[in-house]
């Protein structure tokens, strides 16, 4: 058994990482966005936060299910990703965000933000 085998050593989780990041890249380039759907139901920055978290949870679930070295951890990864969502109402109420804070959101929103900051 070599150190580079996928089920052990430094390559453990390789498929997870490959699939997880590939899903995010495909989502970015395809324009598919959970944020866009959530903006219909809430204010923009909350939708951006929740959309990013949900997208990562789905990507984690798919990646863990496809990676034999991570498959047994898939449910724990999903629950571990969901639990921090419960803190969002507290953070929204008690944490003041910087005026310079950049929220990751839809491509158009980021482009609009970037152009508006250069026009000032």
Image (cartoon, rainbow, N blue to C red):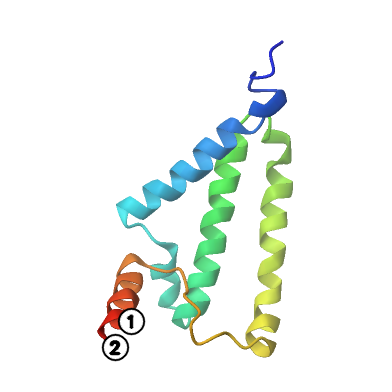
Exactly how many numbered labels are in the figure? 2
Residue at x-position 64% and y-position 27%: 11
Residue 27, labelled with which disc?
none
Rendering quarter of residue 28:
bottom left
Say few, some or many: other residues with alpha carbon within 10 Å of mark 1 (under 14 / 14 to 19 / 20 or more). Answer: few
**Vertical order, 57 against 89 (above or below):** above
In the image shown, does 20 or 102 lie closer to the viewer? 102
Residue at x-position 35% and y-position 71%: 110
Residue at x-position 25% and y-position 84%: 119
95 horizontally vs 62: left or right = right
**Vertical order, 38 against 94 (above or below):** above
Q: Quadrant of the N terminus?
A: top right
Residue 117, labelled with which disc?
1
Q: Position of residue 56 (x, y in %)?
A: 55, 54
Q: Position of residue 47 (x, y in %)?
A: 49, 74
Residue that lies at the very extreme toward the top in this rendered image: 1
Say few, some or many: other residues with alpha carbon within 10 Å of mark 2 (under 14 / 14 to 19 / 20 or more). Answer: few
Which element type, helix, strand or loop, lies under badge 2?
Answer: loop
115 horizontally vs 41: left or right = left
Which element type, helix, strand or loop, lies under badge 1?
Answer: helix
**Vertical order, 65 against 3 (above or below):** below
Q: Which residue is mark 2?
A: 120
8 horizontally vs 97: left or right = right
Q: Position of residue 77 (x, y in %)?
A: 69, 49
Q: Do the CB atoms of the residues marked 2 and 1 lie less than 8 Å apart?
A: yes
Disc 2/disc 1 C-alpha distance (Å): 6 Å
Q: Quadrant of the C terminus?
A: bottom left
Q: Position of residue 15 (x, y in %)?
A: 56, 31
């Amino acid at each position: 058994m070599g150190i580079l085998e996928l089920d052990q050593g430094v390559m453990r989780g390789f498929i997870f990482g490959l699939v997880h990041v590939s899903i995010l890249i495909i989502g970015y380039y395809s324009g598919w966005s959970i944020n866009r759907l959530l903006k219909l139901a809430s204010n923009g920055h909350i939708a951006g936060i929740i959309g990013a978290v949900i997208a990562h949870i789905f990507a984690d679930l798919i990646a863990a299910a496809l990676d034999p070295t991570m498959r047994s951890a898939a449910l724990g990864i999903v629950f571990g990703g969901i639990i921090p969502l419960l803190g969002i109402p507290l953070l929204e109420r008690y944490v003041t965000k910087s005026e310079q804070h950049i929220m990751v959101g839809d491509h158009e929103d980021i482009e609009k933000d970037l152009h508006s900051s250069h026009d000032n």
